[in-house]
Structure formats: structure tokens, C-alpha cells
Image: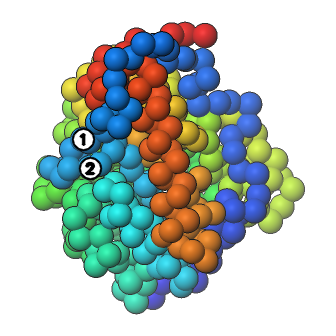
Amino acid sequence: MPNSPKIEDRKLDHIRIVLKEDTLAKGIATGFAAYRLPHTALPELDLAEIETKTTFLGKTLAAPLLISSMTGGSRGTERINLALAEAAAHLGLAMGLGSQRAALADERLAYTYQVRRVAPHIPLLANLGAVQLNYRFGLEQCRRAVEMIEADALILHLNPLQEAVQPEGNVNFKGLLAQIEKVCRELTVPVIIKEVGNGISADDAIRLHNIGVQIIDVAGAGGTSWSEVERFRQNSQIGIEIANAFADWGLPTSEALRQIHAVLPNITLIGSGGINSGVDIAKAIALGADLVGTARGLLAAAVDERGAVAIIEVLQARLTELRIAMFCAGCANLQNLRNVKLQAI
């Protein structure tokens, strides 16, 4: 069926709002400030030899960093995605694409997601809203999303709060666990379950793990709040007030990581949600993350006229901070960092 103009317009709204408005969660933080990495005055290490390599989806990454899903599905967003993909390829990182619902509705928009030509070897993640499995999407649409971008895995994102406050939101989440189980069982690539900024609890992680989910992106509270983003899209004062009531809603990123790692130590965990520095990345890994995702901090660079060059500069700074944090904590590699005991402040 033809793509609804509302979907494409909404994509552009989201980019504009995140870039220009204060959409950070209010009254809640990621929780990383409550922890401190131990300082080692005599690390007996050479900073130049700190090893950050890891593997994800069978591919080697230069560092445990994921450029998290942001956009696609509207004219102009292909430039953003290509710049992000070029940066990921240059630095040897993973990348997720924004929700591909728009391109499944209108295949003329598929090109806005197709970045494999500039990033032939990186782990690339397709993306659909899990709730769409209750709105006429099924295994066929999941397969098409994966094939569209030659993806290594499929993200099914969970966003109940965003959908609930979004003027055109889809709010029937009933029976969704069974739908996700079917996709996990029949899709030929791994399924990643991801929140969008309000976190995933240990209880939810156990339910997801029991149906076959092997990778969870906690996407916790403390960074961009999508109820705050949707607040700027309301057309009534009542709508604004309702969305604003949830500005502090969710499970902080650090707490989501801590909880899930405690009950599912062998599941692959991605820590995202308000990751603002390489020190945050290091703390997330020490709390159990295998990979750490970042998005908001890259969007301004992605729309910079320098494109990938601007993104690479930002990411290189974060990676330098990670290496210095590991060096000063006496960690020669990521396994050492995972064994570090964080100090509660």
C-alpha cells in the first residue's frame, strides 16, 4: 500500500526535534554517576597497547561500540545513514538503522536505509517496531527488512510509552511475546530486542530469554526520552501535559544492565541510553554490557556538512576516553574491564 505521508513526516519531525529541542529525560539519570572505576596509579601498562577488540554477530569489531538506530524512511535521511555507515566502517564498529516500517509500506524509500555499499563488512542491524507484529506485520515483513539492507540481525524495538503518547501511536501490545517467539524461531538471523529509552527489567529479560531471545539492548532511561520528543509533536495543551508527565519514566541504563547481568550472565547485552563518554562506555562494560550503543551525540555530527569526518571525530574522542579509562583502571583488555569491581559513590 502507498506510504502514509504521516510516517515520512514523523521521521523528519523526530530529527528536527532531537536536534533543536531539549528532549532529555527529566528527573532521572542513567545512574553511571553513582559508580566510579577504580584508579590505578601504577597500571604497569602501555596505553598504546590497550586492546579494545571484540566480536559481535561473528564479526570482529575494533571496539565494543554500536552506532544505535536513528533514522531512515524520509527523503534526506539517506545522507545521514550513509555518513554514519562510513564512519562505522572506517572505525570498525557496528551500526543499527532506524525503523524500516516506512520502506516496507513504500519500497521507494528503501534506499534511505541501504548503506551496505559503503560498509561491506560491519555488523548491520535491521529494525522494526515489535508492536507492528500486531498490526498486519509478520515473518515476511521481518525477512524483507533484513534483506533490504543485507542485515546481520533484526532489532525488534519495544516502545510502549512512546506509542501511548504519540498522536498516531499503535498501542495494542497484547500477545506480543508469542509473536516475537515466532520470529525468533523462524528468522534466519538473530533477533535483538531493544527498548527506546525507558529500559528493560530483569523480569522482562527473563521472559524474552525464555522464548529464544539471545541479545538484549537495554536502552535505559537517562538519555533521550521519546515521550519528551512526542511532547513537541502534540497539537493540544492536554497532549503536552500528558506526555510531560512521563519525562522521568523508566529504568536507568546502569540499573537495567546490573539487573539483567545478575540473572542472565551469559546473554549478550547491549548497553545504551544516555551514553555520553568513553568513561560511560567503560562503566557499562564493567556492569555487564558486551557492546555499548550511542546515538544522540552523533546526530548533530551526522548532519554536519563534513558528514562522516565529523562523526569520526566524535567517535574517536569517545574511543580515546575508553582507552584512557581502561589504562587508568589497570585493564589491558575488555575481559579485564568486565572483571573490574565498580566503586559505588
What is the CA distance from the residue labelled 2 to the residue labelled 1?
A: 5 Å
- Say the numbered circle drawn on residue 54: 1
Q: Are marks 2 and 1 in contact (CB under 8 Å)?
A: yes
| Up/down of 14 relative to 54, above or below | below
| Quarter of the picture holding the C terminus | top right
Residue sitting at 74 percent across and 31 percent down?
27
**Vertically, is 273 above or below 155?**
above
Q: Position of residue 321 (x, y in %)?
A: 50, 38
- Secondary structure at badge 2 equals strand
Q: Residue furthest right?
A: 237
Q: Measuring 35% from the left and 37% from the top, which residue is drawn there?
A: 48
Characterize the local packing of mark 2: few (<14), some (14-19) or many (20 or more) Cα atoms within 10 angstroms: many
Q: Which residue is mark 2?
A: 61
Q: Quadrant of residue 340?
A: top left
Can residue 109 be seen here? The reply is yes
The spot of residue 129 in percent (x, y) is: 42, 58
Residue 131 in sight: no
Mark 1: which amino acid? Answer: Thr
Q: Tell me the colour scheme of the image.
A: rainbow
Residue type beneath disc 2: Leu
Location of residue 280 with respect to 155 vertically, above or below: above
Point 22% across, 65% down: residue: 121
| Residue 102 badge | none
Determine whether the residue tagged by mark 1 lies in a helix, strand or loop: strand
Disc nearer the start of the sequence (2/1): 1
Q: Is residue 322 left or right of residue 156?
A: right
Name the foreground residue: 274 vs 230. Answer: 274
Identified at 82% across, 47% down, the residue is 241
Q: Position of residue 107 (x, y in %)?
A: 36, 86
Which quarter of the rendering shows the N terminus? bottom left
